Image: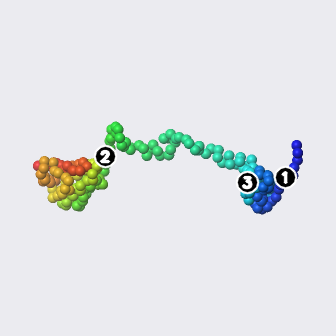
Amino acid sequence: MKVVGQAYGTESQIAQYTGNTGAPGQLVWSTDGKRFYAFNGSTKGGFRIAMYSEIQSLQNTVNGKANASHTHSIGNVTNLQSTLDGKVIKSGSRGTLAGYEALQNQGSAFTINNDSGDNYRFTAAARITVANGAANQTWTKVVGITNASATISLGSSWKWSGGETPTVKANSVLVLKWLGTFGFAALQNTTA
């Protein structure tokens, strides 16, 4: 084995060195950093070579971390199952739906449109205005009317069941169905 002198210097000296242009791959030892640098003859400061202890420390940090590609079951994701429970699927069989919604009480004039709640109880002697819906939308609204002095005004694309405007009586049910370009309204009085 032939022994040759090893190039060496301090970290500050190495930071200014580019290496021997005639010897790409030259290794230089840092006397104060206690590590090697590789040089290509043109890059100032060369390339620090990681020590085994540094690589081991990095490996210890990486160990136990998630792989770049992996899967989880529903049980492994916090709150996923409770978030999914009760959601209605958008296509195919929706299964059996059950439950109820809170009835919204309305005591003054208001307008019903696609963004309104689905079920109301109207208690005022005021106007219920029904807005036209948008193309390609469909929605259904139900309004219980407890005040016989309430009035109903339908948008221009709505028609009454039977073709004539009915008389509002106390305890009536107004059913509204919008179907893309027209609406159908029916009023059922529960008293004579």
Give the left or right position of residue 43, taking residue 94 as reference. Answer: right
Q: Amino acid at mark 3?
A: Phe
- Can the viewer see residue 173 in this picture? no
In primary-sequence order, the first of circles 2 and 3 is 3
The reply to whether residue 129 is visible in this rendering is yes
Residue at (21%, 50%) from the top-left corner?
Answer: 182
Q: Position of residue 131 (x, y in %)?
A: 23, 56
Disc 1 marks a residue whose amino acid type is Gln
Question: What is the C-alpha distance between the residues marked 3 and 1?
Answer: 17 Å
Q: Looking at the picture, how far across and down is residue 16, in whole percent? A: 76, 61
Considering only order in the chain, which callout, 1 or 2, is on the residue closer to the N terminus? 1
Q: Which residue is mark 2?
A: 100
> Whole-Å distance between the Cαs marked 2 and 3?
69 Å
Residue at x 19% of width, y 56% of height: 156
Which residue is at 74% across, 47% downward? 52
Residue linked to disc 1? 6
- Which residue in the protein does label 3 denote? 47
Which of pointers 3 and 1 lies earlier in the amino acid sequence?
1
The answer to whether residue 45 is above or below residue 88 is below
In the displayed structure image, the side of residue 159 where residue 138 appears, left or right = right
Residue furthest right in the image: 2
Relative horizontal placement of residue 30, taking residue 186 as reference (left or right): right
User: In the rendering, at what x and y percent does residue 78 appear?
Assistant: 50, 46
Q: Nearer the viewer, residue 184 or 37?
A: 37
Where the N terminus falls, by quadrant?
Answer: top right
